[in-house]
Amino acid sequence: MTTETTQLQESGSYGGSHWLRDELFERIRQDPTIIRFLDAGATDGLWYRALDPEGAEWLSPRFKALFGYADDEVENATAWWQARIHPDDLVVVRENFEKHKADPAHPFDQVVRYRHRDGHTVWVRCRGQIIRDAEGHPVRMLGSHTDVTALKQAEADLESHAQEMAAQILALQDQERRLERQTRDMAVMAQSVEEARAHLEELNTQKDKFFSIVAHDLKSPFNPLMGFSELLATEGASLPPARVAEYGALLHRAATEAFKLLEDLLDWSRIQLDRVTYAPEAVDLAALLDDNVARYHYAAQAKGVALRTDAAPGVRAWADPHMLNTVVRNLLSNAIKFTRPGDSILVTAGPAPTGRATVAIRDTGVGIPAAKIPTLFDLGARASATGTQGETGTGMGLVISKELMDRQHGTIRVDSTEGHGTTFRLDLPAA
């Protein structure tokens, strides 16, 4: 047995000199690549292991001190460090050793966990390099340890901080979403308040207009009522029958005008107070217009006005029949009122290019002055014009018609040329 073989088979010693240490120093003197490896390692301990024959290993004093042991307290043996490394990491070490042994290009480099003497975990970067003989056969392995516990703790602290930051970010995002919702809610509330304020202002304006009408227009018919009734009361017995009949007719006319104005005012006030129920349904426009033209046929005939309808069949509007009838009757009544004998009125219905339904009432009457058209549907600007044969009205019909069309999500428009006639167009949702 050679001296080297005998040395390789010796058991490890505690502290002091070791034959593998001496051999390592000799190899360092002979092989400059080992010096470069050690220089790059910035080690917290070295280890040097025999691979052929296998069994002996030297652990440097710093290797042992890293885990809380003095050099002379720990045997230089592979079994010692294998008992202190984490079992999962030992599997990784063995796998990388076999790969590095088979292929020198595969690095033996991993971070592993060791159990310190006092029980805490020491994180170590364990790197190594197999030393081969002239034939490339592995004979020794040199390795170094680098303590990366502080780095791992910093990583753990950073991860914990990142998680805390993520939780804070999520909380801030949740708070931001709540604030956005609250902002939207406040904006909606502000819009609602603004709409309510505008509506209240409109109601106040309408109220003022209403009382103006009551104070002026409603009082006007009572002047002839009071005057003629007083005349009949004081002088009726001495008046000739023809004069009494004339005064009676004037009284009836004044009473009728007062009643119609009061009726229109009540209708308008019910609309303003939302006391008119909107009950939409699919309305056959041709049938509705035919019914209304038939209703006004005799009034038009008595005045010598041609009244006819030309409604496309099958056109249906989504509307409230009662409201739509009221609008159509107001417009037909006005058309007859302002059309001269011998002229004509045409009522049509059909689909609109916008996909809605439309109704048009066109007359060849006296038309409307251009200056009056912008305020035609305004309660405050309403004015009752006298018809072609002295017919009177309350001036409320168009105001009410506009309100009723608005309630049905529709529109009412007018085209008129003074002296040549007027066309009113109703636009409604199609059914």
Image (cartoon, rainbow, N blue to C red):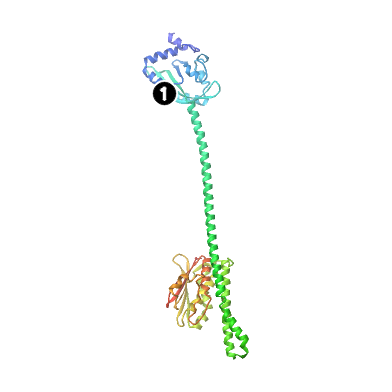
Residue 340: x %, y % from top left: 46, 81
- The structure residue drawn at horizontal position 52% and vertical position 79%, both measured from the top left corner, is 392
Q: Please tell me how many numbered marks the rendered image carries.
A: 1
Q: Is residue 162 above or below residue 355?
A: above
Indicate the secondary structure of the residue bearing disc 1.
Answer: helix
Q: Is residue 237 above or below residue 10?
A: below
> Which amino acid, mark 1?
Ala
Occupied quadrant, residue 261? bottom right
Return the residue nearer the eye: 366 or 23: 366
Residue 266: x %, y % from top left: 58, 71
- The structure residue drawn at horizontal position 51% and vertical position 44%, both measured from the top left corner, is 173
Return the residue nearer the eye: 257 or 417: 257
> Would residue 287 be visible to someone looking at this image?
no
Q: Is residue 85 above or below residue 345?
A: above
Q: For this view, does 140 lie left or right of residue 318?
A: left
- The structure residue drawn at horizontal position 54% and vertical position 60%, both measured from the top left corner, is 197
Residue tagged 1: 102
Q: For this view, does 167 lie left or right of residue 5?
A: right
Residue 181: x %, y % from top left: 53, 50
Residue 80: x %, y % from top left: 52, 18
Return the residue nearer the eye: 343 or 297: 343
Q: Is residue 254 above or below residue 429?
A: below
